[in-house]
Amino acid sequence: MADLTSEFIGIKSPNPFWLASAPPTDKEYNVRRAFEAGWGGVVWKTLGSEGPPVVNVNGPRYGAIWGADRRLLGLNNIELITDRPLETNLREIKSVKRDYPDRAVIISLMVPCDEESWREILYRIEDTGADGVELNFGCPHGMAERGMGSAVGQVPEYIEMVTSWVKQYSKMPCIVKLTPNITDVRKPAEAALRGGADAVSLINTINSITSVDLDDFAPEPTIDGKGTHGGYCGPAVKPIALNMVAEIARSPETANLPISGIGGVTTWRDAAEFMALGAGNVQVCTAAMTYGFKVVQEMISGLSDYMDRKGMTSTSELVGRAVPNVTDWQYLNLNYVTKAKIDQDACISCGRCFAACEDTSHQAIEMSEDRVFTVKDDECVACNLCVNVCPIENCITMEQVAAGQLDERTGEKVPEEYGNWTQHPNNPSNFEAAE
Amino acid sequence: MTSNALTPGIVSGRLPAEDLVENFSDLHPPLDDHEALVAADRCYFCHDAPCMTACPTDIDIPLFIRQIATGTPDAAAKTILEQNILGGMCARVCPTETLCEQVCVRETAEGKPVEIGNLQRYATDTLMASGVHPFTRAAATGKKVAVVGAGPAGLSCAHRLASKGHDVTIYDARAKSGGLNEFGIAAYKSVDNFAEKEVDWLLQIGGITVEHGKGLGAGLSLEKLKADYDAVFLGIGLAGVNALNVDGEDKDGVLDAVDFIAELRQADDLSQVAIGRDVVVIGGGMTAVDAAVQAKLLGALNVSLVYRRGKDRMNASAFEQELAATKGVRIITNASPKAVIGNGAVQEIEFEYTDDDLQATGQTVRLAADQVFKAIGQQLGGDDLPAVERGKITVSGAGRTSMAGVWAGGDCASGGDDLTVTAVAEGRDAAEDIHAALSA
């Protein structure tokens, strides 16, 4: 079994699976259960300033979308930061960390955007024994209306300013949690780096309305006939999160900035993908909220098995392995040609590939009288839609047409050499050079 | 209770009332809302779906299942009923394992098809429970059509004609409508008087008059109907029963299985239905299985289903054969009846072993029997019918007979399997053809 021990900005944990700052980490009781189940660390549910805690709604605070068989695909929430007294949280954090010294305990913070508030909270958490802080600049609902959370995270200058206060008043490693509700995630990441952040974590939740009650004509979750946008998370947001992680990991300005990957991590494979795209570890919430803390055990065994298969002895060998292969569209090899191929033994003749291709794409699949489906190589543009709609795993695959072989669609031989858009004769910027 | 399984002879009350209730409860209990959603989620919404092709009534199965999955079972029901107005009964009695579900791609993928029959029942039951009849009649055409036979073919034909604006009169010799749905199907496939309720629901479209106690040769003649109506549809089924043609067939206790099934279906109190201790059913089709299984469920001690050829030649589907075996019916194959033995009433029945080509072996076996049910097929009855070939009214196209202005469909007509769903399709298609003819 591969060694999953993880060290992230100097913080050690027995595995790279942390629970994200969220309802599962709001109380000592939950966190102890999480550690017993095997989680490597937790980011404690966000603490606010001293004083009367925030209050939550008393109607439903989660909305959801489901796939077939009511599989939870996406969850949104309108819950705020911890609604328990600061003192209670601090006492519990200290107690848990004392009993689980090998686990990572990070404290998430969100206080008003002034230096004194940040100095004060950092002072208050000093003797908890926590391993680090995470600055919640991501929460998109409720707190943002009060000038905190994503209201800070959407202004790079604020990120830099607050981060620098934190580094000034605390020796703790500092992770800045980023909101995805912006246009270019590299900007806040760069600001965090300028402010002295040791790492960024992303993504926080996405502004969302999961559904509308069509009898009451109100967004869900509905509170007394009204609803508000909430923060979206779960498997549905993973592709968005992966891209944002990759954008930071491959940007020269932030390439060396450690990343804690968050967004729909549900299985070991999701975690491995985040790590391959540059995340030093991952944080999980929705999977635990859907299935309970035990899910981490599959993540541990799965990642370990994978690393064994790959001959990796440390998670650091996985982190960032896919980053060099993330590029811009213009550098993709236009001379790489594939064709869809249907495995007739695996095919169950549902015809979904045919419907998709015939109705919406390139009319490149032939359907015989007796429901045998075959790809027309002279029409197939290798779009991959048939692969994606096929219900049988590995039934349709994309097979490369080797260099020198005829591409029946173009009637030309597949070129030997790499060729991208920047070199292509149709690229307008090449016209001038040619003339 | 005075009798039990061991009581000799043909007696009622072999089982306590609560056992009878349990035995004759729904063979496939209806799906609840959650079960229906789970089952519907398994459908892949195939292109040009094989299940649709396999359905004799061409129901758009992927569409109706998607409508269930999206929480609109009434729309699903309409999708079904537009093609098959008796979709509720077909959901109960169709041999789906040899039709839609046999070709389901998930049968190919996992050996477990989407539960199409159960989902169809969920949709149609939901709509019918709301009391809604989703179809209306077109403007009156002033044309009149006579439909003979209130079975699946006749009802389907009548409904489609009524929807086109024609006025329809259905004649049926029995006191109740429904045909085999009402009289010829095992009770556990149509509980809670479903057949009768379905007919009442179907007639809500209006424009259909039903006259019972009248059939061809029983107050009606085809000539007169042709003269009085613009068109005639014959959905008269197969009213006659084939005989064994063996010695002793006339002894007491030797009965037609269809009569037993009908009696049982019409019984208000199953504890009053008499059944033998040692029951022998002769035949290999659905009727034989329905009779044998119900005999067992009524409390008969020994029930044997005897078929003259091998198991794979039986008309009863594999599912029906398994049902019979599960319920405790002993299936004996390759045995042809030779003689009914008894003094006034049957006591034994003698069979001779025969191979699949019915070659006699000369070896015989006797089974104890105080009751024998004959289920070796039905035959067309009636005189002055249109041309008949191989025991069925010859039809071409959509049910056209040799007589101008006379259409036929269902079991009485040539072509197609003798299934409820096939009868519904033939009645519907004949109605469309009649409508086209009357509109010309």
Image: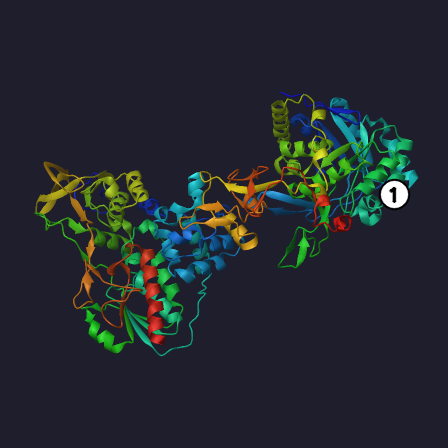
Give the SS element for disc 1.
Answer: helix
Residue depicted at 46% across the width and 64% down the height: B132
Q: In the depicted view, which residue is nearer to us: B402 or B277?
A: B402
Residue depicted at 37% across the width and 67% down the height: B160
Q: In the depicted view, which residue is nearer to us: A69 or B259?
A: A69
Q: In the depicted view, which residue is nearer to us: B110 or A231?
A: B110
Residue A173 in view here: yes
Q: Amino acid at mark 1?
A: Tyr
Tell me the quarter of the picture where residue A398 sits: top right
Label 1 belongs to which residue?
A: A158
Q: Chain of mark 1?
A: A
Tell me the quarter of the picture where residue B351 sits: top left
Q: How far across and how far down the image is residue A200, in percent?
A: 79, 35
Residue depicted at 85% across the width and 28% down the height: A172
- Is A213 placed left or right of B297 in the picture? right
Q: Residue furthest bottom?
A: B142
Picture layout, residue B361 above or below residue B81: above
- Is B364 placed left or right of A109 in the picture? left
- Is A318 placed left or right of A135 in the picture? left
Report the colour scheme.
rainbow
Q: Residue furthest front?
A: A435
Picture layout, residue B356 above or below residue B92: above
- Is A151 placed left or right of B340 in the picture? right
Q: How far across and how far down the image is residue A33, in percent?
A: 67, 29
Q: Quadrant of the N terminus of chain A?
A: top right
